Image (cartoon, rainbow, N blue to C red):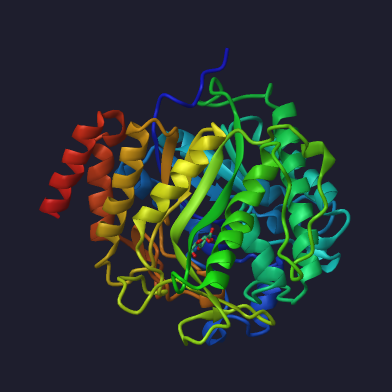
Amino acid sequence: MSRDLHNKFLWGAATSSHQVEGNNKDSDWWAWEAKGNIEGGITSGLATDHQNKFKEDLQHAKNLGLNSYRFSVEWAKIEPIEGKWDANAIAWYLSLIAECEKLKLLPMVTLLHFTLPKWFANQGGLTSPQAAEKFANFVTKVAHAFEGRVPIWCTINEPIVHIVGSYLGGFMPPALYSTKNVSLSYENLLRCHLKAFEILHSLAHIRKGPWAEEKIMVGYAHNMLSFKPEKFFHPIEQLLANRLNKIYNYAWIDATTGRKQKFGLWGVIPKAKVIPELFHKNKTDFIGINYYTKAYVQWRPRSQLSTPIKNLPIGINFARRHEVSSDLGWAIYPAGLKSLLRRVSRYNLPIYITENGIADKSDSLREEYIFSHLEVIASEIERGVDVRGYYHWSLIDNFEWIKGFWPRFGLLSVDYSNFDRHIRKSGQLFSKIIKAHLMQKPKKEILATLFNLRNKS
Ligand code: BGC
């Protein structure tokens, strides 16, 4: 009988392949970066050279006291040409897993984290009618190669961000504006998730390694935002905040848990087709939440702060002027996580916080950010919410997509002149929190310990 990955709270940190490894030459992002699409015209290049420094990085993770590491496998490296598998790329991921095993860092593996192989992107990528089939070939290859050594899988990282970035917001390749493609790629990502879920479960009898006894868990990492109307009494903004909350935060979770499939925005984004295979069936073992901030929704945006959505009279702000916010201008808002956790707990599935973190180069806000979000998580666990792990974004500074390298999210800083890593003060503090074994304690004790650590820091 396999055990349930339940007993131990997972303390982790997350990264993604393109953002840290370097040399992702056969991906759509690599080609897009070369066309000058990244701030300052830079490219990801060697990223953080994690490809060569992974042992050092994992040793840091171990020293911090983590017991898990979330990373992604790069489809473009594993299948650089359609149907041709790169044995060296697979071998590198196997050595990464071996290192996790050696250091007792349970691997949580993401199969798709924003980057696509160029050949697949050229066929239409997420809008291709064969998207799910092609993705399934890759998943099958990876699952066989890894021989059941991975106990937790995230099929897709932030499906909604991926499609919005690609077909609405212009911040990810192919950066086309097509509301039709928003719906189409949404449907296809659901199909990709479903296929991966089924493949990984059908191979669940093959297990190896230190976690072979644990029941495998297949879910996803879903970005959630705390939506607010920009003006509280503005009826259209209220309505929009409400609607965006439904389609951005909950449509995907509803669809993957056998509930009503409802994705679209009146007259703007066509309704996505329903996927009959998902009717009344639960197709996720957990819900992974990537939570960072809130989003003020503006009708006919006026403020400069607001990010307009091309061709739509809607704007999003991630903070008001007076609010304490990150280097990217995202407000620190742990209360948003509290309400999301309460609502997500109604799905009665295990929850992992698969990402939570802040761009804070001076490291002046990260400690408070970590404290305040962990306080929320601890008190929700005490209320009975089944949160099983917390993964900080990120283990190390990395390539922050269209922004380039300047936003610094790492518990470890990276000196890009020589790729040296240094643990940040907030990293030390996170380590103290973990080492206090907080989540195993009763709430009163957790909160008291957090309080003491906060006062000492
Ligand atoms: C993504 C990461 C990204 C982070 C900070 C998440 O949306 O999964 O890839 O670096 O947020 O923006």
Q: Quadrant of the C terminus?
A: bottom left
Question: Residue 241: percent from the left, percent from the top?
Answer: 54, 64
Q: Nearer the viewer, residue 98 or 252?
A: 252
Q: Nearer the viewer, residue 334 or 393?
A: 334
Q: Say which residue appears at 32% left-offset and 32% top-offset.
A: 382
The extreme top residue here reads 1
| Residue 153 in sight here | yes
| Residue 22 in sight here | no
Q: Quadrant of the N terminus?
A: top right
Q: Say which residue appears at 67% left-offset and 79% top-offset.
A: 312
Q: Nearer the viewer, residue 345 or 25?
A: 345
Question: Residue 341: percent from the left, percent from the top?
Answer: 45, 44
Residue 109: image quadrant is top right
Q: Say which residue appears at 60% left-offset and 25% top-offset.
A: 208
Residue 174: image quadrant is bottom right
Question: Residue 221: percent from the left, percent from the top?
Answer: 56, 48
Q: Say which residue appears at 66% left-offset and 81% top-offset.
A: 310
Q: Classify residue 274 as left or right of residue 312.
A: right
Residue 164: image quadrant is bottom right
Question: Residue 50: percent from the left, percent from the top?
Answer: 49, 58
